[in-house]
Image (cartoon, grey):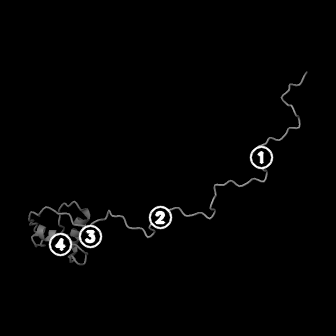
Amino acid sequence: YVVQYTSPYTDKKDIATRVVMYGYSPYQLGNTSWYWDNYVKLTDGNASGDGSVISPEPETPVTPENPEPETPVTPENPEPETPVTPENPEPETPVTPENPEPETPVTPENPEPETPVTP
């Protein structure tokens, strides 16, 4: 015997079905007074299966246990945004190269390679 009723909460319909089918007490399922109250309303307290149904009251959504789930949890580190100081205090300073002036061009062996060779 299954109580059929539509609910905006599908999992609640599932649990209410189990309450009727297996005869669990609402305490065995946890906080299910909502399901148990609606089960009594829908069956008029009669689980014999004759299908008698009282017009149920409009369903009021259950108030969640956490009234403010949107408030962010305070992190353990109060300032996680501050960057960690690197071990090298100034990693941006360029390392001095071994050759002090690598930009100076090497003098070519031919001093004037641009002059055309006279045929």
- Looking at the rendered structure, the kind of residue marked 3 is Glu
Q: What element carries label 4?
A: helix
To which residue does mark 1 refer? 102
Residue 94, position in %: x, y? Answer: 68, 53
To which residue does mark 4 refer? 36
Q: Which residue is drawn at 39% across and 67% down?
A: 74
- Looking at the rendered structure, the kind of residue marked 4 is Trp
Q: Residues within 10 Å of mark 2 (few under 14, many from 20)?
A: few
Q: What element carries label 1?
A: loop
In the displayed structure, would residue 51 be above or below residue 92?
below
Label 1 vs 3, first from the N-terminus: 3
Q: In which quarter of the image is residue 42?
A: bottom left
Q: What element carries label 2?
A: loop
Q: Which residue is drawn at 85% across and 39% down?
A: 107
Whole-angstrom CA distance, mark 3 to mark 2, is 30 Å
Label 3 vs 2, first from the N-terminus: 3
Residue placed most toward the observer, 81 or 13: 81
